[in-house]
Amino acid sequence: MFNVTTALPTENATYERPFDEIGIAVSAFIIFAFLVFGIVGNGLTFAVIVTYRMLSENIFMRFILSLCVSDLISAFISWLFLYRRTWGFDVWAPLPDIFCKFYWAADIMTSFVTALHIFSFAVLRLISIQFFAVYNKIKIRHGNIWIACIWVLSFLCGFLPSWFIFGAGERDRFGDTPDARWPACTVLYDQLVAYSYFQKISYTIFLYLPLVGVVVVCSAIVFIVRIKSRKVAPSKKCEKRQKREKQVVLQLLLIMASFLIGYIPFTAYEFWGNQDLPKTPYYRFADYWFGMIEYFFLRFSEVLNPLFYNLGSAKMRKHTKKFIKTKMLCCINWKKRTISHSVPTTLERSSSAVNNGA
């Protein structure tokens, strides 16, 4: 899969890509598998929440609904990542440059949206557990405004700047410039300084701080739930509430775990890629596969999200099963078939007795 024995490029050397046809096939299989599962899982979750009013009128489900939209966008554009890292690695053709710009702009915007949603989800859970009176004052319209602000902010601070910073262009593979090892569709060379500032400011605000914030808030929620369970005297009402709170904590921890699975490798690659690495075949190979594998983790985390939504919520599981049974498999007769035994009438019993006597 990997060309790790390529000699150092010289003026007379032949350039070799840091992957071969087997690497392309394996990468395509993984990414297309995640694409299918991501669309099916998030599409099903979206449909279930929209269909049942009990779910759609819950503020937490509104955030999950919006997260599904973000993950669906990421799934639909994942084939562009595959193309830019494989067939379009050296020459971004025949796809127009606008596809490259749209991929980067949409990918960074959805990353910001996901991070802010999960952080907001965690903060809202903390309010519902520790400040219940305040939580009761939060209405669905407040949640809708909150979600809309996240999308608008992510579009203005993520999509628009990325549209001008990224683009497709020919890379000098034998040169000494930083983009010598990068794909054709990546940061425009004349925008490197702008990208450096963009990354330091926007990534810190919209990715790294929410990442730390989610961990801190989730830890605080776990601590509060444990303290409450120790202080309250045992009763049926308290047991039900504690069970519900533990279910809430489980759902939040699962969503946080999915978030960390995707964005810790992403963050690690960002720090790696910004270093002034030696222009050797080894570092070209390492940079390429590090970037490819961190994207596998990111896509995997988005596939896990619908599963974690259901594992962490009994109400969600119940309605998902109901949706699949009544909407998707509606043509199947779910009624149990029973064997009918006819009960003989009095006349029949009398006739039978006469015949037996005869």
Image (cartoon, helix red, strand yellow):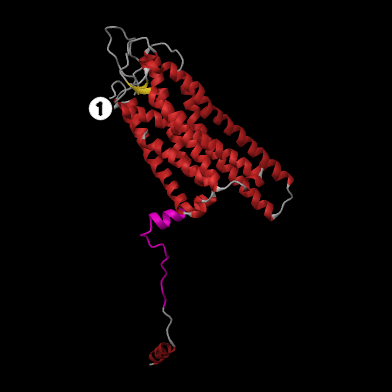
Position of 103 compared to 304: left or right?
Answer: left
Q: State the SS at label 1.
A: loop
Disc 1 packing (10 Å; few <14; some 14–19; many ≥20): few
Residue 34 is situated, as x and y percent measured from the top left of the image, at 39, 37
Q: Which residue appears at 30% of the width and 25% of the height? A: 88
Disc 1 marks which amino acid?
Pro
Quadrant placement of the C terminus: bottom left
Q: In this view of the protein, can residue 160 be seen by the observer?
A: yes
Position of 127 compared to 315: left or right?
Answer: right
Which residues lie in the magenta part?
A: 321-341
Q: In this view of the protein, can residue 273 be seen by the observer?
A: no
Give the residue furthest to the top. 11
Quadrant placement of the N terminus: top left
Nearest the eye: 19 or 96: 96
Residue 92 is situated, as x and y percent measured from the top left of the image, at 29, 24
Q: Which residue appears at 41% of the width and 17% of the height? A: 192
Residue 12 is situated, as x and y percent measured from the top left of the image, at 26, 7
Q: Quadrant of residue 248?
A: top right
In the rendered image, residue 132 lying in the magenta stretch gets the answer no
Residue 285 is situated, as x and y percent measured from the top left of the image, at 38, 18
Q: Which residue is mark 1?
A: 94
